[in-house]
Amino acid sequence: MAQGVVGQGVMLTPVEIQVLQDLTIVVLAPLVSGAIAHVEARWQGRRGPRILQPYYDLAKWFRKETLVPEDASWVFVVGPMVAFMCYLIVPLLIPVLTTYPLPLGYMGDILAGGFVLALGGFAVAAAAAETDAPYAQLGSSRAMTFGALIEPTILFITFVVALVTSTDLPYFEAAAARASVAQIVRPAHILAVVAFFLVVLNDTGRIPVETHAGTLELGMIDEARTLEHSGPLLALLTWGSAMKQLILYVLLVNVFAAPWGLASTRSAGAVGLAILALLGKALGVGVLFTVIDNSFSKLRLFKITEFMAAAFLLAVLAVLVLFVGGS
Amino acid sequence: MGWDLVVILVVPGVVGVACWWLPPRVGRPLSIASGLLTFVLALLLVPARTPSALHGWLRADSLSVVFVVAVGFLYLATMVFAVGYLHPSGGPTHQARYLRRAFAGLNVFCWAMAVAPLVSSLALLWVAIEITTVVSALLVAIDDTDGATEAAWKYVLIASMGLGISLLATIVVYYAGAVTIGHDYDLFYPTLLAAASRFPPQVVRLAFVLAVLGFGTKVGLVPVHTWLPDAHSEAPTPVSALLSGALLAVSFYAVLRYFQVAVRTLGPTFPRDVLLAFGLASLGLAALYLASQRDLKRLLAYSSIEHMGILAIGMSFAAPIAVVGVLLQVLAHAAAKGTAFFGAGSVVRKYGTKDMRHIRGGIGALPWSGPMLVLAVLALSGMPPFGIFRSEFLIVEGGLSDPHDAVVAVLVVLVVLAFLGLSWFSTKTMQTPTPKSVVRGETSKWIVGSMVIGVVALTVLGVHPPGQLSDLLTRAAAELRAPR
Amino acid sequence: MLLAHSVILSSAATVPSTFAGVADALTVLVLLSEFAMLHAQLSRSQIRLYAFQSLVVTALAVYVAAERHIPGLYAIAGITLVLKVVVIPAIVLTLLRDARVELVASHRLGVATMVLIAIAVSVFGIFTAGSITVQSRSLPSGALGLAIAAVLVSFLLIVLRSDVVSQAVGFFSLENAVSLTSLVVAAGLPLIVEVAFFFDLLVAVVVFGVLMRVHHSHHDTLSTRQLDRLRG
């Protein structure tokens, strides 16, 4: 490595950065979850778990045996793995660390990323539906229902990206936002950011859609899906959901809200800084979500459609505003 | 110098405010005097001249004068009627406080309606019409019954929505003018009309549709008429008479002002088609509803919608004579509908109900106002020798010479249908034997007097309109025509 | 990479000016507060939303006045601020306090359905306005569509909610939307006319207030559902 130090420091190959990008998500995801849980506990006046607790949990679950319900088929086992794989693929498509697209960045656009994420969600739901447990099935059916309801919003956000950049590659949306302040204050962008924020609230199972740390099964959506899994499978599910959360945060900050602090060169220093910046931004978003979590109450299940309607409204308005004035 | 315009701008308003404080015995003669003054001044405007005052903010061209005359006449007649109707003998609610408020409201209402045609800017026209809404909504609610409250709420809500739309129309016209003339102009008619041919047509088209829809709510054009029957039936009778005879006409005047601009920019076809569509809908719906009414005042309200429909249809005919007919109809309708409501007020006072199933033998019970009510209703359904016969005849004649034969056929059929509805009322309730239980005799001399004024005016308009009035109508019709 | 840069450059070229962006954002805020009124459960929060909406309109007027050098607009903004942000909400809130009613079940439809209808109506309004070309000297012309959409949504507020406060607030916010339209197409309406409009609004508010009071004293509720006696 020492030989590579030339002027700006160690230069990494694109492939190395690509791998690093995936590793960042995989490794940092439990840390972000742990930090959020910790902050949340402090916010509520509790001492809270250690920040590194999720790693200990994962390690513990990997050491345990796997219990499979009698009636469950192979889907029960494969589902969590597929989901985990999906969450490994998505980071390849989005600007996690760099402003410039990496070799596999052209592999898929926003829609592809969305589909892969959705496939992960479907795999989890399918695995949960394999069991006879009513709560797990309830959770998987609810998750799919609300996922379908939030889908139009995501579609319209994609339209916004497409109209702004004439492509639907997340790298270009981020670059356009970085290019000028006018881009950030244009109403379409603001509306799309807020709409996407609501989508993230929904997809990460936060209040007002769901109490993410609750123990009341009747109100659960995402959480209920993992109730029947144990051992390494549970570890994969938990890890996967932490990764999904971080991926959504990355999309929120690096594509829409604050696409700064990414590495624009291939030097190791810049990439390292980008990792730190990403961690900081993800924690910032996490704290924001925690604040929302503690300031609002959960909506009744049948009122969630209002939440969806609000998100949809914002996304539609974003497109309309682009249409009427090109702004 | 148009000192007469300034007097109309000041006196009724001041009288209205004074009536709020003065006891009714002073307020009554004052109101009649104010009505008389306004009417006389309006008549003095009839000869050909175009006075203006206050740096051009007030201006009376022939079109304005037609409507000022209508309002002035109804102002006088209604005040005479109100003296008899709004009387402590009228019921427990008619106490001094109520009477003071009612007279104040009536005067201010008439003031706003008389000023609306005199202001020379589209923007102030909107303001004047909004004031009529505000005052008349309170007047509709003044009886404080459940029905009156409901009617007033619906009225103020729907009319306000309409006025919101017409405010939009005002702004859009301003924009059309600003593009052409520049930003520093005050929407004065002469300026607008002189430049109208150069306005952007798309924008004027939007403005005209908005104006017809917006002011149309107050005219009572279907489908934005829904407040009208309720407000007319639940309001105190003098208010109903003013609403129907004057307010609808003044709102129609606002539509005509937009029509003037629109024909200059767009040519006559588009504005006429819009008015034709609204007019046919109004006439058709009203004719159907007339046949099935049990409430006396609602019957007259639907008759108003019918007549407004006829006005709109008349405007859609190209022949100038049809437009003369429309303007004559404005005057005749004011007289006829005023008289009819006065008669209805007399009947309601006598029988204590508006339900026509409980009203029998009106002619016998009311030796003067009964027959005059029948005459007014006959006049409303277009019978000679009254003014509406003449005006509808002119409209039909204009339609036939246009030629708009199909529309004229529909018009005639619907008018006949409306005639059947109205005459069913008159035979059923008025020309039947009077029940023994009903005491014969008029309730008030003043009510009879107001109806005499109305019937005389109707007859004059029908038999032989004064030459100067005919000239006025011809000139006003010429102002409404698209210049070549 | 080359492709990427060219795309980025071309998209950057279509980015509107900061003025247009801010103006459009404020216009969108007016429309959004209209939606929020449609949704709001408490009469009180509806009135506050109205005050907020008026504040946004004021801010927009000031911004346009400063950027486009139309001094008359400052006066209008001042009157708007006093009347629509302070006086009118205060009047209605006082009436509401006297009525001692907080919550009126007045949604005729589910919230999501209402929002979807309102979105459809807004789309209609925006595309209708888009079909006419308007050269505005004060605001980006796209704002016209948004203003028209706000007008239409305020109609929905009157039609789809059945309590007197919603309907009154619907009318007031209709007026807000119309003055927004006038900011777009006719900034610089003669001052006397503007003042007349304001005066008129104030009178209308008093009338709405009186009628709300009368309604409450008759029916002992702010709901308008039992106003169905008169028909035919």
Image (tube, rainbow, N blue to C red):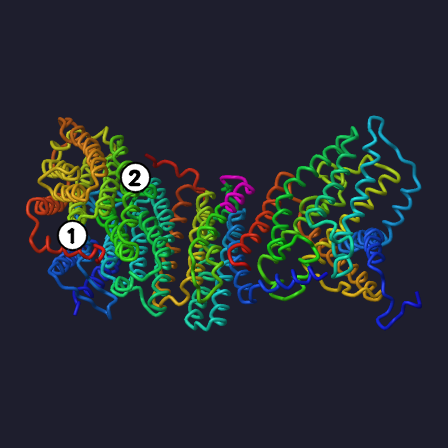
Q: Residues within 10 Å of mark 2 (few under 14, many from 20)?
A: some
Q: Is residue C116 magenta?
A: yes
Q: Which x, y percent locates residue B65?
A: 17, 57
Q: Which mark is residue B270?
A: none
* Mark closer to the observer (1, 2): 2
Q: Tell me the amino acid under the disc marked 1.
A: Phe
Q: Chain of mark 2?
A: B
**Horizontal arrangement in the rendering, residue A133 relative to residue B417 (left or right):** right
Q: Does the rendering let one see residue B100?
A: no
Q: Earlier in the sequence, mark 1 or mark 2?
A: 1
Q: Which x, y percent locates residue A297?
A: 67, 47
**Horizontal arrangement in the rendering, residue C165 relative to residue B22 (left or right):** right
The verdict on a common chain for dots 1 and 2 is yes
Q: Chain of mark 1?
A: B
Q: How many marks?
A: 2
Of residues B65 and B102, the one drawn nearer to the viewer in this rendering = B65
Residue bounds of the magenta highlight: C108-120
| Residue of label 1 | B73
Q: Which mark is residue B281?
A: 2
